[in-house]
Amino acid sequence: MFFLFIAALVDRLALAQLYAFDGLYGQDAYAYFAYAREGFQAWTHWQTPPAFWWPLGYPALLNAAFLVGGANIATAQIATMLCGALVAPFAFALAREAAPHAYKHVAGWVAGLLCAVNGQLAQSSVVIMADAPALMWAALGAWLLLRYARTRNVWTLAIASFAVGMAVWTRWQNLIFAAVWILTLLLMARQENVRVKHGARGLLACGIIAIVLLPQLLIRTTTNAPLAGQSWLEGWSALNFFARSFDNADGHFDYALPVAIFYGQVFAHPAYLFGILTPLFVVGVWRMNSPQQHRQVVLRRLELFPKTILLLGWILGMYFFLAGIPYENFRFSLGLFAPIAVVTGIGGGWVWEKWRARERLKSLLLLGWIGVALLVMLVWQPRVLAPVLDSKARELAHVRWLETQLLPNALVYTMSIDGALKTYSKIRVENLWNMDPATLPSDVPTYLYADTNNIDSQWRGRLPDQLVRGLTETNFLHPLDTFEGWTLYRVRDCTYRVLDCE
């Protein structure tokens, strides 16, 4: 386990150093880091932190890291790297608990190495966002639950419950994992002769999860912040499985692939599970459903087994949810990769065990097959990181260009690059969504910097489009210059108010 952790951590450190990437890009990473600093300031002064759209588990994790390394970008990125690197040893341990004794070591190593070299996990580990920590908590909770099934140690269950609570608090998507986890715990309790004790332990586990989530409820009560901040739940529909065009909270999108096929790439894409390993995943699914592997366990004559329910339920539940949301984001599939790696490890371990004694050449070929797949996944990592680096380079280019164009003490309204402007310049910036033409300041130079083509295509009819169109039609925007498709406008004094957006 220690070797896997070190190997994964070195890989992530090397990526960040090689490409001089500090973990911030886009909008989400800046938002997480800015809120974590605001929250840290509030907590250290015994104040209630401000409202936040996403769950607070990841900012809370960063706040704990800030106590050690200070409230800076490097601390946030290192904390996220550590979480991403820990997924590999936790997947190793989870596979060892889930696989039969005969090949648990092989299953563990395959699962752990898959998580160590996974391109999307490597990218999410160097980006200051919640995806990698959320997967770490979920993998830890799953491993310790199966360990509890073997040892019946109450402290193991308590720590597992805390990890599940943190997984949910870090990403609401893990509510699906938590439901599967609790179902698995209930099935385990039904196997016991003394059900009262294990029923009480089930209540203990649920109580710990609730306590972990309690701060979110308290902050929601005091700040009126949204409880979930998850628009995909509202837009979920089975009709979205094979749809490609959507109007959602983030605007209008047209995608190349239907949603179900897009998220199905997790089972065969080099950034996740390279396609030549997919057959081993299929073998793993088959072995987990084989009654011969679980002769000692039968629940009311139904072959429902905790390990199978936990791993396959985690995969199917997550995938079914993602396949129905009106949005496509490649990193969302990361939430179900740990169990995919474990099931693939079980499949690889079973094949290895079958061939090792009778067909040694085939067993060596199997190791070579897996080794080639892992090498391809490792080499693929820079390709997964490339879009992030390109986005960061564009942001910094916009920041440097604006610094040469604006008058002193200027106020700039923009969107999507406001985080970069706040972080890497001294320019006073506000998000375009906060713009009210009726209250624009008249004592400072005011500008609008926008990608009007993107606003016209993605946000047509919504507030950004209304603002730009309203200011343009009333001649309050004076174009100054363009840079990489963006236009810089000087905003003249105005006293009207655009129509409110629904």
Image (cartoon, rainbow, N blue to C red):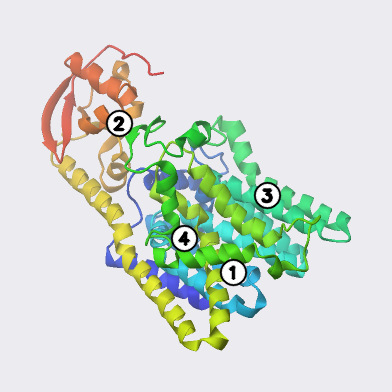
- 438 sits to left or right of 211: left
Circle nearer the N terminus (2, 3): 3
The residue at which mark 4 appears reads as 79
Quadrant the N terminus occupies: bottom right
Residue found farthest to the left: 481
Marks 3 and 4, how far apart in space? 23 Å
The picture places residue 300, in percent across and down from the top left corner, at 81, 55
Q: What element does badge 1 sit on?
A: helix
Residue in the foreground of this view, choosing between 452 and 354:
354
Q: Residue at x 66, y 53 (%)?
A: 181
Callout 3 environment at 10 Å: few (<14), some (14 to 19), or many (20+)? many
Residue position for label 2? 458
Residue 472 point in image, percent of width and height: 19, 19
The first of marks 4 and 1 along the sequence is 4
Cβ–Cβ under 8 Å for marks 4 and 1: no
Residue 69 visible here: no
Q: CA distance from mark 1 to mark 3?
A: 24 Å
What's the residue at 28%, 21% (across, down)? Answer: 467
419 and 484: which is toward the camera:
484
Quick one: label 1 or label 3, which is nearer the N terminus?
1
Residue 115 vs 229, above or below: the answer is: below
Q: Amino acid at mark 1?
A: Ala
Instruction: Tell me the residue that label 1 is attached to.
Output: 95
Given contact means CB atoms under 8 Å apart, are the residues at marks 3 and 4 in contact? no
Q: Is residue 422 left or right of residue 266?
A: left
- Name the residue tied to disc 3: 209
User: Residue at 10% of width from left, 33% of height from top?
Assistant: 481
Seen from the viewer's position, the closer of residues 278 and 460 is 278
Mark 1 or mark 2: name the one nearer the start of the chain: 1
**Looking at the picture, which amino acid does disc 3 mark?**
Ile
User: In whole angstroms, how far apart are the C-alphas of marks 4 and 1?
Assistant: 25 Å
29 sits to left or right of 450: right
